[in-house]
Amino acid sequence: MTTKLRVGVIMGGRSGEHEVSIISGQSLIKALDKNKYEIIPIGITKSGKWITDNVINTLKAGSDNDNKELTEKILTPQPHTHQLMALNEQKMTNLGLDVVFPVLHGTYGEDGSIQGLFELANLPYVGAGVLGSAVGMDKVIMKKIFAWFDLPQVSYADILKTDWLEDQDKKIKLIEEVLAYPVFIKPANLGSSVGINKAKNKNELIKAIDIAFDYDRKVIIEEGLEDIREIECAVLGNDQPKASLPGEVKPSDEFYSYQDKYIDGKTQFEIPAKLDNKLVNEIQEMSVKAFQALDLSGMARVDFFLTKDNELILNEVNTIPGFTKISMYPKLWGVSGLKYEKLLDKLINFALEKHKQKNELKTSYKPKSDWYK
């Protein structure tokens, strides 16, 4: 009898994308093969508590600070046990894990923070490592790396909150010197279109920047493009990644907003996108190049703009793409011949493969003399 892998599905988190993460986790748990995996749902509440009891309902209910019945857990950084320990009446209950699948979108889940904890615990995990997660999350650093690899991008500017508070007029003047309206204003380290707004003039720009600074200390302002198509491509793998067929997002709003993505449900998708073979190949090649430029692993969704002249412009990379029922990442692989359940199998296998390679490396060095004593 084959022993099932114990898979921890981690969702929620201290992020503006908390609610999206819950739905991604719910979808993932439903799709994982119960004959192969023992699934352990793990929730992180908005205040940062780790829980394993009635996870989805508890996270959806919120107000965890007032819930004294929640049994809090901790992931031990001890590198050999892979234990999630329950703190219950001073007793430690072992909930050992073989691999974790984080669907934590945004800060403290997609930015390298939790990946660092997994590394300390020597625990296999799905997705990019600490470095790839961190640079993939920060849109400003991401764009600087893309520029180094000569990947085409829109013009942009970035500002820190301290500089904004010191002299708003100066910053507005600098932005208007390099960018033409309309512009898009985004928190540098967030996704799911949280905190994003479009500005067509100076007053709208100031208001949008203030909103973005509610979510991050750094804000990016990108020049808007007219008459564009939004194209997305999914990448899968470690050192030799593959790209899916691309799909097209057709927002019902002025842009693909949070409301449009998850609430109104009016966005239309064309999967696969109606593109000629040459353009499909170009999108796939650029997706893999962006994936490798950021030193990613496991999975990523790469987003593009396509102009009316068929010029391809790289927008950004999402290292933990959504896994909701409407999410593009699993849908793109579906039309590329890889069903949802098999996609999850591959992602788990890539996590175990990466972990095995890392554990074959030396972590100590024997000097020729005991000079340090």
Image: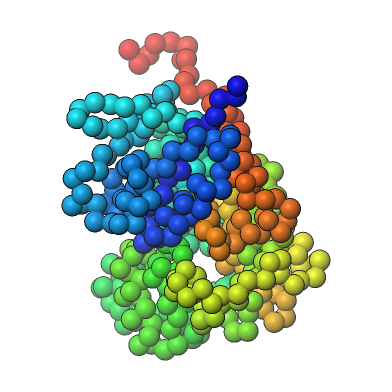
Query: Please, which colouring scheme is shown?
Result: rainbow
Above-or-below relation of 237 to 119: below
Residue 38 in view, yes or no: yes
Closer to the camera, 183 or 171? 183
Q: Residue furthest top?
A: 369
**Position of residue 103 in the picture relative to residue 51 (left or right):** right
Determine the residue positioned at 65% across, 45% down.
342
- Residue 76 position within the rendered picture, expressed as x and y whole percent measured from the top left: 34, 31
Quadrant housing residue 271: bottom right
Number of marks drawn: 0
Determine the residue positioned at 43% across, 83% down.
199
- Residue 67 position within the rendered picture, expressed as x and y whole percent measured from the top left: 20, 49
- Residue 372 position within the rendered picture, expressed as x and y whole percent measured from the top left: 35, 16
Above-or-below relation of 161 to 21: below
Above-or-below relation of 310 to 12: below
Closer to the camera, 119 or 250? 250
Determine the residue positioned at 59% across, 65% down.
303
Closer to the camera, 14 or 217? 14
- Residue 301 position within the rendered picture, expressed as x and y whole percent measured from the top left: 59, 58
Closer to the camera, 78 or 334? 334
Quadrant occupied by the N terminus: top right
**Position of residue 90 in the picture relative to residue 309 (left or right):** left
Determine the residue positioned at 39% across, 11% down.
370
Residue 257 in view, yes or no: no
Quadrant occupied by the C terminus: top left
Q: Residue furthest right?
A: 277
**Position of residue 262 in the picture relative to residue 286 (left or right):** left
